[in-house]
Image: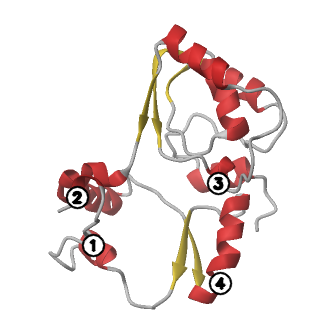
């Protein structure tokens, strides 16, 4: 684990040529004030993956007609009971009504018909260096439980991957142009159901 706070690690990984305007550490005190200073005109789109204190800091800054794609709530994945303190649901519902906010669940398989275009575009963007990513790779399926705990504690940096074989994945072969076979698994639920 890096000795740098998360925001500093993120900023360092983005580099000086990045298109990012700011990088905040959600674990540092004063997130709400720092976020407000960073977004003085408010927030129009917030892609929600975390929940918890991060969403609490974002909610008052959402502009009228803001859109919130909701993909996850990792801050709550281990919750065995409701969080202590007042019920924030009335505050959230009030903000949705007054600011006319749009929340929408976001699951990747809803867009399965766009996968071929995505892979074509992504292959080009990766080759051009327009997309940058970080991977946190651990070898061995036996290490998966420990790595899941690290993920839930926020100790990983980048996409968490458990490598169970040295062979490249079908997705990587497709993205790099080594295979014409689109690596899409059939699911038994959702829009891809047969």
Q: Is residue 60 left or right of residue 170?
A: right
Q: Is residue 166 left or right of residue 189?
A: right
Q: Does 173 appear above or below 94?
A: below
Q: Position of residue 106 (x, y in %)?
A: 40, 43
Query: Mark 1 = which residue?
Result: 176
Query: Mark 3 = which residue?
Result: 77
Q: Which label lies toward us, 4 or 3?
A: 3
Question: Label 4: how many residues lie within 10 Å, few (<14), some (14-19) or many (20+)?
Answer: few
Callout 1 secondary element: loop
Tag 1 near tag 3, CB within 8 Å: no
Q: Is residue 15 left or right of residue 56?
A: left
Q: Position of residue 38 (x, y in %)?
A: 66, 25
91 vs 70, nearest the viewer? 91
Query: Mark 2 = which residue?
Result: 192
Q: Position of residue 155 (x, y in %)?
A: 72, 63
* Quadrant in the picture for residue 156: bottom right
The disc, 4 or 3, on the residue closer to the chain's N-terminal end is 3
129 vs 114, nearest the viewer? 114
Callout 3 secondary element: loop
Query: Mark 4 = which residue?
Result: 143
The disc, 1 or 3, on the residue closer to the chain's N-terminal end is 3
Q: Which label lies toward us, 1 or 3?
A: 3
């Amino acid at each position: 684990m890096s000795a740098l706070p998360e925001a500093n690690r993120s900023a360092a990984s983005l580099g000086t040529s990045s298109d990012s305007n700011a990088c905040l550490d959600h674990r540092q005190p004063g997130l709400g004030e720092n976020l407000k200073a960073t977004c003085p005109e408010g927030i129009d789109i917030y892609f929600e993956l975390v929940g918890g204190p991060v969403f609490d800091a974002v909610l008052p800054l959402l502009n009228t007609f803001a859109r919130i794609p909701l993909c996850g709530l990792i801050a709550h994945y281990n919750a065995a009971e409701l969080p202590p303190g007042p019920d924030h649901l009335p505050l959230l519902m009030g903000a949705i009504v007054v600011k006319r906010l749009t929340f929408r669940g976001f699951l990747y398989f809803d867009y399965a018909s766009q996968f071929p275009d995505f892979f074509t575009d992504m292959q080009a963007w990766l080759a051009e260096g327009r997309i940058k990513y970080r991977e946190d790779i651990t070898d061995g399926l036996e290490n998966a439980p420990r790595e899941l705990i690290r993920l839930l504690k926020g100790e990983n940096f980048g996409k968490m991957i458990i490598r169970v074989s040295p062979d490249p994945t079908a997705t990587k072969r497709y993205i790099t142009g080594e295979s014409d076979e689109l690596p899409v698994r059939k699911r038994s639920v959702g829009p891809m159901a047969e």
